[in-house]
Image: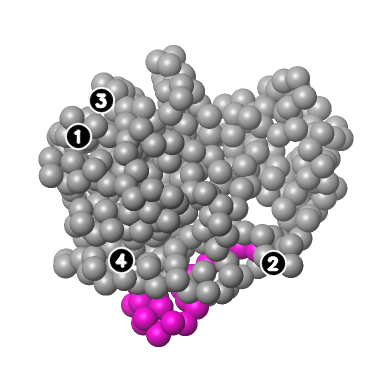
Amino acid sequence: MRHIYIHVPFCRRRCSYCDFAIAVRKAIPAARFVAAIRREHELRRRLGEWDGEPLETLYLGGGTPSLLDPEAVADLVRHFTGEAGGATRPQESDLEITLEANPEDVTREAARAWVACGINRVSLGVQSFHPGVLRWMHRSHGPEAPARAVKLLRSAGVRSISLDLIFALPESLEHDFRSDLEAAVALEPDHLSIYGLSVELRTPLSRWISRGAIAPPREERYAEEFLLAHEYLTARGFEHYEVSNYARPGFRARHNSAYWRGEPYAGLGPAAHRYQLTRSGEWMRAWNVDQWAAYEPLVAAGTDPTAAREILTTEKRALEAVYLGLRTSEGISPADPLIRAALDEGPLLKLAISKGWLRNGGNRLVPSAEGWLRLDQLVVSLTTSAGGG
Ligand code: SF4
């Protein structure tokens, strides 16, 4: 598989907005986790789901992968990169190996160990630099932790550092998003992921809102702060290359870009998704049971932990290709046969161009920041005749 995602489900506590499949643990069962991932990998090979393609990107996401001890991280990385044809991949390797980390987990020893096993990209869950906002989010780090973490990662030799920030917070928090952007840029990251807060069911946030303890975020605030980030970061040399992602030239996330291009990928661990071509030539998306407590005994017993699978029809793949393509600054090509199967080139397309939401750049349709603000609406408008409406 060219692209492998490993879902590390452990967190110290649940953040107020988070509905991810996580396992809150004080003690992290790192060795058991590594053993479970190796077993699932072996199982997928036995099932014939693993091809011999050379690895290009490995992504340890979560959850909080940085809660694994550095030896466990190295075991996982070496297991997959060793298979890709080298015992230990140095930083000069053309593999992209990403670790998601919380700032408070970055120590000098951990950063050195991560680099030694080949990790060359670290995505830090910063979210904000405001102490009150961090407390409200239930984050376990303070506002000083990201600067310390970035310094340690740089001096250990991590090639690419990404920071996550959240915007569109409830009014009552009086969040100054611009100062978060300033603080983030001052750390000279290579990449930034900027997410608008969304209220998900079964989160502390949704419970606070339903009992009236806090008002939900205003939609206008989302639009204002989305455009503020776009203007602020593009003026400082970042490319806005995907609706939520910015990079300095040469530092786009290759792993995530593979998702947006509709390339196949493997996913291991609880709740991990995978997307691949079956032996019978059909495109399949499948995902594992989402709870660690269910996943671990299944793989220990040699049972496939898949929760569900879907075979994607050509129509569905075409709609996804339009949606994923329009998430990116590459846009979509109406000449691509898959895109052509979904794209409605009728009056709504002309309207989107006349409004400036889409630009007809050569032979590609490319969204503007204003277009990204209306991404869902845009996709529905452009795919109505293919069933998108
Ligand atoms: S650290 Fe990340 S995955 Fe864990 S609870 Fe917080 S937002 Fe969710």
Tag 2 secondary structure = loop
**Closer to the eye: label 3 or 1:** 1
* Distance from Cα at disc 1 to Cα at disc 2: 43 Å
| Amino acid type at image mark 3 | Leu
The vertical placement of 328 against 16, above or below, is above
Tag 3 secondary structure = loop
| Amino acid type at image mark 4 | Val
The residue carrying mark 4 is 34
The residue carrying mark 1 is 156
The residue carrying mark 2 is 279
Ligand 1 contact, mark 3 (Cβ < 8 Å)? no
Res. 356 image quadrant: top right
Task: Tell which circle, 3 or 1, labels the residue nearer the N-terminal end.
Answer: 1
Task: Tell which circle, 1 or 2, labels the residue nearer the N-terminal end.
Answer: 1
Report the residue at 30% width, 66% height from top: 34
Residue 81 horizontal side relative to residue 54, left or right? left
Ligand 1 contact, mark 1 (Cβ < 8 Å)? no
| Amino acid type at image mark 2 | Arg
Residue 76 horizontal side relative to residue 382, left or right? left
Pick the residue in front: 362 or 119. 119
The residue carrying mark 3 is 187
Residue 259 image position (x, y, % from top left): 56, 47
Task: Tell which circle, 4 or 2, labels the residue nearer the N-terminal end.
Answer: 4
Query: Which range is magenta?
Result: 284-305
| Amino acid type at image mark 1 | Ala
- Are circles 4 and 3 on residues that touch, CB within 8 Å? no
